[in-house]
Image (spheres, coloured by chain):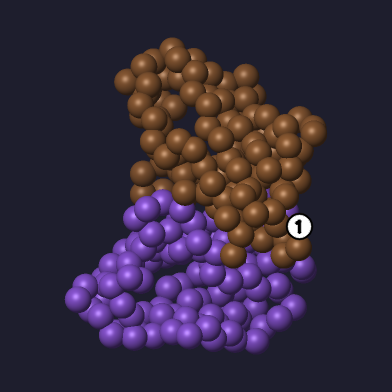
Chain colours: A purple, B brown
Amino acid sequence: AQKVTQAQTEISVVEKEDVTLDCVYETRDTTYYLFWYKQPPSGELVFLIRRNSFDEQNEISGRYSWNFQKSTSSFNFTITASQVVDSAVYFCALSESLGADKLIFGTGTRLQVFP
Amino acid sequence: GAVVSQHPSRVICKSGTSVKIECRSLDFQATTMFWYRQFPKQSLMLMATSNEGSKATYEQGVEKDKFLINHASLTLSTLTVTSAHPEDSSFYICSAVTGRENIQYFGAGTRLSVL
């Protein structure tokens, strides 16, 4: 069965601190896709990244970076120099397909960034 | 990214009434849309997969007659909560899959409160 675990329920940091959100997944599939979504207080989920199981290269996008390690079944997300606007709930998700298939979500990590 | 509009954003209704929630893809056509339910401070649980022109596929444990889904066009899917009861109070959120990127983009959600 597929499962996504986000062990950190809540994280609080002060602005400009770096923060890493952990994501551990379980799947028997050899082909799968991992996602991160951000849910600000307004409610909508904002797509951040998709990674397929064959691409273990780390990715950087501005202050965001992702570390995918198949050996530990982890897909961690780091925010560098956090800002108040980063405050949100962040969800890691797993899918068997590119996107036209159901997403298995983790329980989310609530990040609060204080000024 | 693609834009998904969900309406209404909030609805309060009396027990026994039916409520319709609309999910529209504004700048793309979506043959597949998903409906999720989210309880406070919890993860998103998939309720059903909505395919244009065909019957929705419901997840185990979701009552088809209770949660009616119609995907009448490539840009619109509706979820009707029939004879709503207080236990149906929740945050309902839809997503639509872009054909080009195969990514699920989410609406802003609907908070349903049944009195």
Amino acid residing under circle 1: Gly
Query: Does residue B56 show up?
Result: no
Residue A40 drawn at (x, y percent)? 38, 59
Outermost residue toward the left?
Answer: A115
Which quarter shows the N terminus of chain B? bottom right
Query: Does residue A112 show up?
Result: yes
Which quarter shows the C terminus of chain B? top left
- SS class of the residue under badge 1? loop
**Dividing the picture into quarters, in which one does residue B112 lie?**
top left
- Give the vertical position of A61 relative to A3 (above or below): below
- Give the vertical position of A59 relative to B25 (above or below): below
Outermost residue toward the right?
Answer: B53
Residue B33 drawn at (x, y percent)? 67, 44
- Give the vertical position of A97 relative to B108 (above or below): below
Residue A5 drawn at (x, y percent)? 50, 62
Foreground residue among B112 and A3:
B112
The structure residue drawn at horizontal position 45% and vertical position 15%, both measured from the top left corner, is B17
Foreground residue among A68 and A39:
A39
The structure residue drawn at horizontal position 37% and vertical position 53%, both measured from the top left corner, is A42
The structure residue drawn at horizontal position 56% and vertical position 35%, both measured from the top left corner, is B22
Residue B71 drawn at (x, y percent)? 70, 34
How many marks the image carries: the answer is 1
Say which chain tag 1 marks: B
Left or right position of A11 against B10: left
Give the residue number, with chain letter if any, for mark 1.
B99
The structure residue drawn at horizontal position 35% and vertical position 26%, both measured from the top left corner, is B12
